[in-house]
Amino acid sequence: MYFGLQVTCTTLFTLLLLIGCSPKQACYEGDYMACTCDNGQPGFAACDVDADAYGECAYCGSVPGLTIGQGGTGGSELAAFMDNCTQNSDCETGLCFNYTSKGPKCTLPCESDTDCPSPSPGCNNKGVCKAP
């Protein structure tokens, strides 16, 4: 009985060790990570799937896939970052937030100041980029 228990415990320990030591993928295609560019502007680093890591900080002062700060042109166009809006579907960013003193503007969710591109001065305590 002691031998059987020892074999079972050894097998279980070995399996747990193998599972715990299996390599994890650092990032996935289409992932971006907030970063600070060499010029001090907030930016985003894209996942390099071949290297299984994030590349250098790029997209300085902008958000990948969005036209930031260019202003909306009306019609069926979506409003750009920090343009006025009435609902989430109005915004390229997908988020229309009603700022107490500035009114509703298209913004982005954030956790730190580096998540917010210009012209936003940073992240507020509600988890969205501040309006300038």
Image (spheres, rainbow, N blue to C red):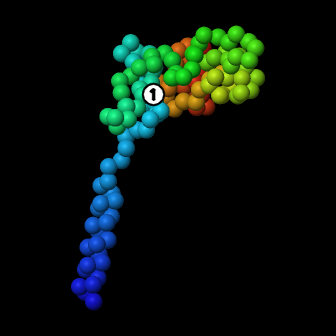
> Residue 112 in the image: x percent, y percent?
49, 29
For residue 105, what is the image quadrant? Answer: top right
Tell me if residue 29 comes above or below residue 22 in the rendering: above
- Residue 43 in the image: state x and y as whole percent: 45, 21
Classed neighbour count for the residue bearing mark 1: other residues with Cα under 10 Å, few (<14), some (14–19), many (≥20): many
Judging by the rendered image, the residue that carries numbered circle 1 is 34
Indicate the quadrant where residue 86 lies. top right
- Residue 74: in sight, yes or no? yes
Q: Judge left or right: residue 116 versus residue 54.
A: right
Quadrant assignment for the C terminus: top right
Q: Residue at x 65, y 28 (%)?
A: 94
In the picture, measured across the screen, residue 87 lies left or right of residue 16, that is right
Above or below: residue 6 compared with residue 113: below
Q: Residue furthest front?
A: 50
Q: Quadrant of residue 79?
A: top right
The quadrant in which the N terminus is found is: bottom left
Total marks shown come to 1
Q: Amino acid at mark 1?
A: Ala
In the displayed structure image, the side of residue 9 where residue 57 appears, left or right: right
Secondary structure of the residue carrying tag 1 is strand
Q: Position of residue 46 (x, y in %)?
A: 42, 28
In the image, residue 78 sits, relative to residue 95, either above or below, namely above
Look at 25% across and 87% down and name the residue there.
2
Where is residue 10 shown, x and y percent of the image? 26, 73
